[in-house]
Image: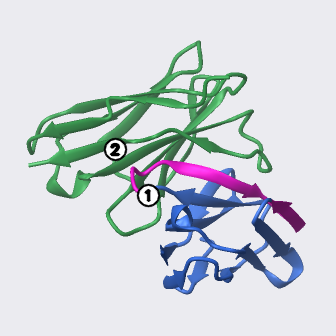
Amino acid sequence: DAGVTQSPTHLIKTRGQQVTLRCSPKSGHDTVSWYQQALGQGPQFIFQYYEEEERQRGNFPDRFSGHQFPNYSSELNVNALLLGDSALYLCASSPGPGLTNEQFFGPGTRLTVL
Amino acid sequence: GIQVEQSPPDLILQEGANSTLRCNFSDSVNNLQWFHQNPWGQLINLFYIPSGTKQNGRLSATTVATERYSLLYISSSQTTDSGVYFCAVTSGSRLTFGEGTQLTVNP
């Protein structure tokens, strides 16, 4: 049973560039959530996708956008990168968007913005 | 929004010692999860425990939802237990994380 997978593992970009991160959910899961984890802090919720639509959004600017595909995989796009976007980006999947569903996390993508 | 506080922020133990990590939350929640983040950043699910008590080997957890806290117990700690432990609660389908407890287990 494959768990949540993310790609790439590491990424280095420069300010102003755009980046796309990818996530494949755990088998049997149809809901994907994205989180940003700055160094020394807990993960912060970015947004959640279910049925190919953004269902909830955290306190992140419009530079952060996403997409979910019919096979439930998802992308996180960040435009006009800032130094402060350097972080570990985590994807989580769950069996539906329900309030009681357990979430499982991928290994993360470490983004460095220079 | 909901607030999640974890204590202590840092904990240093000798191998074989027991420990208790605490998580307080400011409002009623639908779900509570405990995670262990390894040095590579992977969040490993420890417990899904909105209420009651669960045990898994040397680890156990108790959530008292009416009093808005959860406890994670680690017995006979091992060096491989080192890392950051996060408590996260669900409100509105999103997980809200605490700041974590950094655990160091020395041989």
User: Which chain's colour is green?
Assistant: A
Which kind of residue does numbered mark 1 sit on?
Asn
Where residue B81 sits, quadrant-wise, is bottom right
Report if residue B49 lies within the magenta region: yes
Determine the secondary structure under disc 2: loop
Evaluate whether label 2 is on the same chain as label 1: yes
What residue sits 15% from the left and 55% below the top? A83
Q: Circle 2 marks a residue in which chain?
A: A
**Residue beneath label 2, please?**
A62
Q: Is residue B106 above or below residue B50?
A: below
Q: At 17% from the left edge and 41% from the top edge, which residue is drawn? A: A80
Question: What is the chief secondary structure element of the magenta stretch?
Answer: strand
Q: Which chain does the blue colour mark? A: B
Q: Which residues are magenta?
A: B39-56
Position of residue B6 measured from the top left corner of the image (x, y, whole percent): 59, 80
Residue at 16% in and 39% down? A12
Could you tell whether A35 is left or right of A83 in the image? right
Helix, strand or loop at mark 1: loop
Residue B24 in percent (x, y) is at 68, 81
Q: Quadrant of the N terminus of chain B?
A: bottom right
From what the image shows, is residue B75 above or below residue A54?
Answer: below
Q: Residue furthest top?
A: A70
What is the number of the mark on residue A59? 1
Quadrant of the rendered image containing residue A16: top left
Please indicate whether residue A112 sits to the left or right of residue B102 in the image: left
Q: Which mark is residue B76?
A: none
**Percent position (x, y) of residue A81?**
18, 44
Residue at 59% of width from left, 81% of height from top?
B5
